[in-house]
Amino acid sequence: MNKPSIYGLTLEQLTNWLGERGHKRSRAAQVWEWLYRKRATDFAEMHDVNPECLRLLADSFAVSTLGEHTRQESVDGTNKFLFRLADGNLIETVLMRHKFGLSVCVTTQVGCNIGCSFCASGLLAKSRDLASGEIVEQIMKVQLHLDAAGEGERVTHIVVMGIGEPFDNFANMVDFLNVVKDHKGLAVGARHITVSTSGLADKIVDFTDANLQVNLAVSLHAPNNELRTRIMKINRAIPIEKLMASIDYYLERTKRRVTIEYILLKDVNDCTAHAEELAGLLEARKELVNVNLIPYNPVDEHSQYQRSEQESILAFYDALKKRGMSVSVRLEHGTDIDAACGQLRSKQIRKEDRGGTGGVALG
């Protein structure tokens, strides 16, 4: 039976776990420093930690549960990692370079059941949630990759926008956030972390009440129920009215800005009438809302959708700006390496099904 990842424990959980087994609280702090500051990849490297404590940890946990299967590097410096989990499943993690720092997009589930009709990630149904340690370890693997390059770079920002619906794996996601935020560890600032959801309204309320101080992004993608239900089946269970009520709860309680994500699909949701309707929907909330327009990345299996023309994107943008909305167009990263979530994994699985050797790992 595979051992769980040590990265799955918050510092408090590790302290309590060791304490229940007769070890001092200070030993947890030592182990934590070795994991996140000194970035040990084996318990044997922790030479100043009590040997009995290390034996106990090694018998109960693993430091590494992810293996790098494939890595692709874009001309713009984006790195897409395909990791193999201990059970053989494949997940994707993406490192993006921005002017403001290095951002990592993490995956929270193997597959996805939300079923957005335009999304590559949903091509494979969810088979399981990732444990919190498997999510944390994605960050650690990327950081170790940066360490090996010898440039002194560190992960400064995190977006929880990879494969899966983060709020459908809520407890593990929260533990992940508490680990990466901890100032004694990776110390990624809460305001440098964004969690994206397709609109699980009840979980948005729970997220608000958890007071995690991280940013929230909501995938809306349509200004009315008829259109949203057509492209996002989740809207059948959670219509826009219920979703907006949960967003209002978040805005009222936190006074923090929400990002509304809107993917532009040619001749589907990208006309100026849709922009006007979207502005009307968000009018009362516009002081605390930013609309992020996303140019569509075509997926072979979703050939019914095409990327909006540049003129349509600009017209949509202008219509929102004229209504006083805060709006931006997402900067694309890694276009030459299939930047859309799920594409590398899907192509790899198809290769393996055909008996191919898969991609060649870089670096």
Image (cartoon, rainbow, N blue to C red):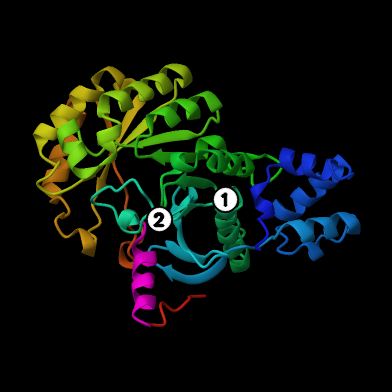
Q: Indicate whether 88 appears above or below 241.
A: below
Find residue 334 and report its horizontal and vertical position in percent.
Answer: 35, 61
Q: Indicate whether 252 appears above or below 348.
A: above
Left or right: residue 357 compared with residue 180: left
At x 48%, y 50%, the residue is 108
Give the main secondary structure of the magenta stretch. Answer: helix
Q: Which residues are magenta?
A: 341-355
The circle drawn on residue 223 is none
Left or right: residue 238 compared with residue 170: left
Q: How far apart are labels 2 and 1 at the CA level?
A: 14 Å
Q: Indicate whether 175 appears above or below 208.
A: below
Q: Are marks 2 and 1 in contact (CB under 8 Å)?
A: no
Label 2 residue SS: loop
- Residue 311 in view, yes or no: yes
In this rendering, the count of numbered labels is 2
Find residue 170 and report its horizontal and vertical position in percent.
Answer: 50, 39
Find residue 251 and report its horizontal and vertical position in percent.
Answer: 41, 21
Viewer-side residue, 302 vs 96: 302
